[in-house]
Amino acid sequence: MSIRTKLILLFLAIGLFPALVISVLTFQNYKASLESSHITALQNVAAYKASRIDTCFLDLKNHLEVAQNLYSIKNNLPTLSRLYSRPNDPAYIASKSLLDNQLNKMQVVMGVHDFMLASPQGKVVYASDVPYYNLNFRDALRDIQQKVFENGKNGIYFSDIFPDKEKEGDYAMLISGPAKDLKGHFIGVIIFSVDMDDIYRLVQDVTGMGKSGETLLGKLYGDEVIYLNPLRNDPQAALKRRVKIGDKVGVPMQNAVQGKAGSGEYLDYRGHRVIASWRLIPTVNWGMVAKVDVAEAFAEVSKLRNIVMAIVFGVVALCVVSAFYFARSIAYPINRLSKGAEIIGNGNMDYLVGTSGKDEISGLSRAFDNMTRKLKATTASRDELNNEIKMRKHIEGELRRSNENLEQFAYVASHDLQEPLRMMASYSSLLEKRYKSKLDKDADEFISYIVDGAKRMQTLINDLLTYSRVGREEAIISAVNINTVLAGVKQSLAAAINESGAIITNDELPTVNGRESNFTHLFLNLIDNAIKFRGSEPPRIHISAYKKGLEWVFSVKDNGIGIESQYKDRIFLIFQRLHGRGAYSGTGIGLAICKKIAETEGGRIWVESNVGEGSNFCFTIPA
């Protein structure tokens, strides 16, 4: 293998190894960050919707308890039960009329579809919506009605969901409870019929859940889970799609109906990989799952992969070019020396291999020419010939040792070529200093591109390394005085503060537990951004903190250019820039580092801002 090939391979190894390490770390950290973000969002969705549904059924329970205390029911239900077979009896008509006047109004206020009363024997003797009752319950739902009556005698009971015959594709359920007279004697059962439309609309709302996100309801029947609502990918699923407990699919819903709350990555009812959060709705013992497809959740990772691959390819290209240049500078004089030795060895004593360079190889080539001239001046006598033979032998040995020395030199030189990117940046800067304004305008521009590109790549890789180290450093957690941290940050930013005329004030700040280096990075990035993204007036920055529950809420408020509302979440993602490099410097990683630090310390970060009115960056730390 030639020296050129060896050097190219060595440069590639040196350049690719850190690039690949950075890529792996970036992927792992960013994927974990995305997964955590999605799980938090899904947990919030599931908690919110479960709470709304729970509240809805608690309200219905309260409504039924109100109905249980109605004097008109206590007084008139016995009459209706006794005279049900004689609907034309004046006493029956009077009791029904009294109930109609009150219950029809309550039906609207309570949001129930039908208000029914059953006798102690289980016969429905009153329905506020007679056509709806005849369509859905008469000779149609005997099993459900029987359960509703039997369970409703002993306490408030929520029935299973059933198809509503009044509207195709709609569903309803029954709620029942005991009715007692003024002396506390059992006189029948009060039954509500509830339309599921409002609950289904809440559950099927996918606002903010992307193209694949959805929320599911399910209930445990024996060893099976039955889905209760139409699904985004299966509109006919309600009361039809089932999953057995123990199946590999639908695991989140299996956990939810068994009373387990949690989140994670599993197969959904379709067999697709999803990120899901699940919990139980205790009032009705329904399971709720909020989920989104893994493919959609990690789409941003693919974008990051493309960016990192572009950086890797750039590093490879620079390594190849640099290796080719250095290999050529070393291999060319060695090849010339080797070829010259062969020619001279074949008897051409006039051939010269010397070069004018100042390196060791050039010096060796000139020494070789000097030896050749001395050989040519020797006599052809036998003794002289023997001497010449000896001298020649002394020369293929010198040459061999020279070659060995050259190989050793190449080996040592290659091992000394550490941190290739830093070397490229140094040489490109040197090229700029020596030849700027000595070549044409295009050459100056090209040189500046090389220098700027190398420096930006160094900054980008350093920022990526900083991002990847957050959360992995084994710094000791200790009590950190934020006032002391802020003082150090101000000292580090003294030049920028003086140049911009910034005024930085702060309230008395607390002492918290954490990693001091993390808090330094966090305040350094936020204050530096406040100075950088300033308006026409000098920056005014105020740092404050207040205790809220079990955490401290910190605020870094400025009077800068502000942020449009649609970018308030995007700015915390890696490589997200809102301005071109010509307007503001930076790599787009600073706020991503802030987000990761806040989460590593057990908190979160967000921004409150309006364009032209400044920004207020807030983050929390456990108290």
Image (cartoon, grey):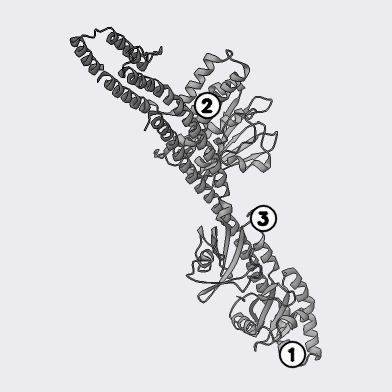
Pick the front one: 477 or 303: 303
Amino acid type at circle 1 is: Tyr
Please name the residue that numbered disc 1 is placed on: 84
Q: Residue at position x 48%, y 21% from top?
A: 427
Residue at 61%, 57% in the rendered image: 213
Residue at 51 percent across and 62 percent down: it is 261
- Quick check: can you spot residue 408? yes
Comes first in the chain, label 1 or label 2 = 1
Where disc 3 sits, the SS reads loop
Judging by the rendered image, the residue that carries numbered circle 3 is: 207
> How dense is the environment of label 1, judged by Cα within 10 Å: few (below 14), some, or many (20 and up)?
some
Q: Secondary structure at mark 2?
A: helix
Cβ–Cβ under 8 Å for marks 3 and 1: no
Residue behind mark 2: 455
Residue 606 drawn above or below residue 218: above
> Residue at 62% of width from left, 17% of height from top?
441
In this rendering, would 448 be left or right of 21?
A: right
* Residue 44 position within the rendered picture, expressed as x and y whole percent measured from the top left: 58, 55
The answer to which of marks 3 and 1 sits earlier in the sequence is: 1
Q: Residue reaching furthest left?
A: 383
Dot 3 amino acid type: Thr
Q: Residues within 10 Å of mark 2 (few under 14, many from 20)?
A: some
Q: Nearer the viewer, mark 1 or mark 2?
A: 2
Q: Are marks 3 and 2 in contact (CB under 8 Å)?
A: no
Nearest the camera: 368 or 487? Answer: 368
- Amino acid on which disc 2 is placed: Lys
Q: Measured from the top left, where is residue 114 in percent x and y?
A: 73, 76
Q: Nearer the viewer, mark 3 or mark 2?
A: 2
Q: Residues within 10 Å of mark 3 (few under 14, many from 20)?
A: few
* C-alpha separation, residue under disc 1 versus residue under disc 2: 92 Å
354 vs 231, left or right, is left
